[in-house]
């Protein structure tokens, strides 16, 4: 059985385009996407509510306790 930690990651945006769909210092959910990682990107759910590829270096990966991840994911659904 997969756990929340295995399926979801969260990042904080540190680089964003003006008038883009990302905000600096904001927490974003990352969806698993091996092909995106191969090209240096992350599949991120942005402010539009959709998932798009963004350069991996626009973010800092963070580890959250399982309980907090579960709570964040519950709010999104």
Image (tube, grey):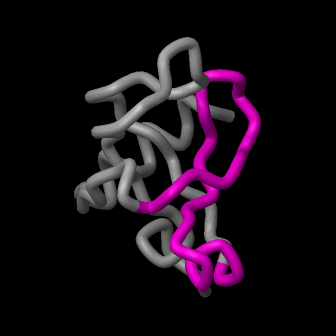
Question: Which residue appears farthest toward the right when viewing the image?
Answer: 50
Question: Which residue appears farthest toward the front when viewing the image?
Answer: 18
Q: Residue at x 58, y 22 (%)?
A: 20
Quadrant that contains the C terminus: top right
Residue 76, given in percent of the width and then of the height, sits at: 60, 32
Q: Residue at x 56, y 71 (%)?
A: 7
Quadrant that contains the N terminus: bottom right
Q: Residue at x 49, y 17 (%)?
A: 18
Instruction: Please give the range of residues in magenta.
Output: 34-56
Residue 9, given in percent of the width and then of the height, sits at: 44, 61
Question: Which residue appears farthest toward the top when viewing the image?
Answer: 19
Q: Is residue 24 left or right of residue 19?
A: left
Total labels drawn: 0
Taking the magenta stretch, the answer to whether it contains residue 5 is no
Please identify the quarter of the rendering in which residue 33 is found.
bottom right
Taking the magenta stretch, the answer to whether it contains residue 43 is yes
* Closer to the camera in the image, 20 or 60: 20
Q: Is residue 57 left or right of residue 17?
A: left
* Closer to the camera in the image, 67 or 23: 23
Q: Is residue 61 left or right of residue 56?
A: left
Q: Is residue 50 left or right of residue 18?
A: right
From the viewer's perspective, is residue 54 above or below residue 45? below
Q: Residue at x 60, y 85 (%)?
A: 38
From the viewer's perspective, is residue 46 above or below residue 3? above
């Amino acid at each position: 059985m997969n756990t929340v930690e295995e399926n979801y990651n969260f990042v904080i945006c540190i680089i964003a385009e003006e008038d883009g769909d990302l905000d600096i210092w904001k927490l974003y959910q990352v969806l698993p996407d091996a092909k995106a990682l191969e090209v240096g990107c992350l599949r991120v759910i942005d402010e539009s509510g959709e998932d798009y590829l963004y350069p991996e270096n626009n973010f800092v990966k963070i580890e959250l306790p399982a309980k907090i991840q579960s709570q964040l994911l519950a709010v999104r659904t």
